[in-house]
Amino acid sequence: GQQVMQIPQYQHVQEGEDFTTYCNSSTTLSNIQWYKQRPGGHPVFLIQLVKSGEVKKQKRLTFQFGEAKKNSSLHITATQTTDVGTYFCAGRVAGSNYKLTFGKGTLLTVNP
Amino acid sequence: DADVTQTPRNRITKTGKRIMLECSQTKGHDRMYWYRQDPGLGLRLIYYSFDVKDINKGEISDGYSVSRQAQAKFSLSLESAIPNQTALYFCATSDPTQGSSTGELFFGEGSRLTVL
């Protein structure tokens, strides 16, 4: 079945450092979504990427979708303590309009 | 008030007991989902429903059943709970007509279940 691999599993940074998490799918995706889950909270939608090579920015967050639509990344510039949490990617396969396959997530901790 | 409400938020039970987790939503979405979260394993789909008459198995449906009582209500049952069903359970909704053909997921706050 479809798999979405996400690395790293954990990342600890000093406040102000950059952070990147990567997702790779075993199959071509129709789109990919990113979610953030704060400690003790529930996943919250951040963004969806649909087009090959797409790049979207939200303030300090930059999201990319690979040309082959099999990989994606989330980059945070100059991390802040409010960025702490687990970041999940979730990919959807073309023709499967329900099935979002989640990566295992990257837990980001930020040392102030 | 939360748009997607789960009850109970926390539950401790014993092996063999029947447990029901309930989810209700005020978003008016047709699609509802039950996910399970285990540390280091991400979110795995248990069941999903596209409307009241539609129920579908997800990746890990064994040992679980669901009921879609109304558009706004989707409950998850463990007929005979076992310890490896100890996990954090999330209900979610989506509306594929919002913005794209896929729709983002709106999650409830989660139900933490411990089976002893």
Image (cartoon, coloured by chain):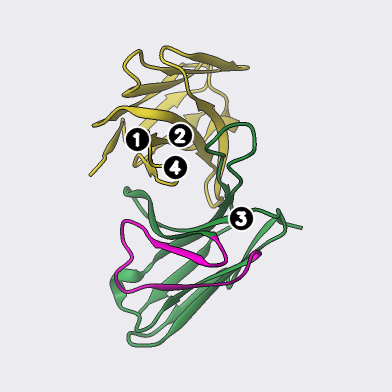
Chain colours: A yellow, B green
Q: Earlier in the sequence, mark 4 or mark 1?
A: 1
- Vertical placement of residue B51 versus A14, above or below: below
Please state which of the two labelled residues, at mark 4 or mark 1, is closer to the viewer. 4
The residue indicated by pointer 1 is A10
The residue indicated by pointer 2 is A109
Task: Check disc 3 and give the amino acid type.
Answer: Asp
Asked if the residues shown at circle 3 and circle 4 are in contact, with their CB atoms under 8 angstroms apart, the answer is: no
Asked if the residues shown at circle 2 and circle 3 are in contact, with their CB atoms under 8 angstroms apart, the answer is: no
Chain assignment, label 3: B
Q: Per the image, is B70 magenta?
A: yes
- For the residues labelled 3 and 4, the Cα–Cα distance comes to 14 Å
The residue indicated by pointer 3 is B30
> What crowding class fits label 1: few (fewer than 14 Cα within 10 Å), some (14-19), or many (20 or more)?
few
Specify the quadrant of the image occupied by residue B14: bottom left
Asked if the residues shown at circle 2 and circle 1 are in contact, with their CB atoms under 8 angstroms apart, the answer is: yes
Percent across and percent down for residue A13 are 43, 25
| Callout count | 4
Question: In the image, what residue occupies the spot 26% across and 31% down?
Answer: A27
Q: Secondary structure at mark 1?
A: strand
Looking at the rendered image, the quarter that the N terminus of chain B falls into is bottom right
Q: Which of A16 and A70 lies nearest the eye of the viewer?
A: A70
Percent across and percent down for residue B57 are 36, 62
Chain assignment, label 2: A
> What crowding class fits label 4: few (fewer than 14 Cα within 10 Å), some (14-19), or many (20 or more)?
few
The segment highlighted magenta reads: B51-72
- For the residues labelled 2 and 1, the Cα–Cα distance comes to 8 Å
- Vertical placement of residue A69 versus B35, above or below: above
Q: Secondary structure at mark 4?
A: loop
Q: Which disc, if any, is residue B64?
A: none
Chain assignment, label 4: A
Horizontal side of A95 relative to B33 (left or right) equals left
Looking at the rendered image, the quarter that the C terminus of chain B falls into is bottom left
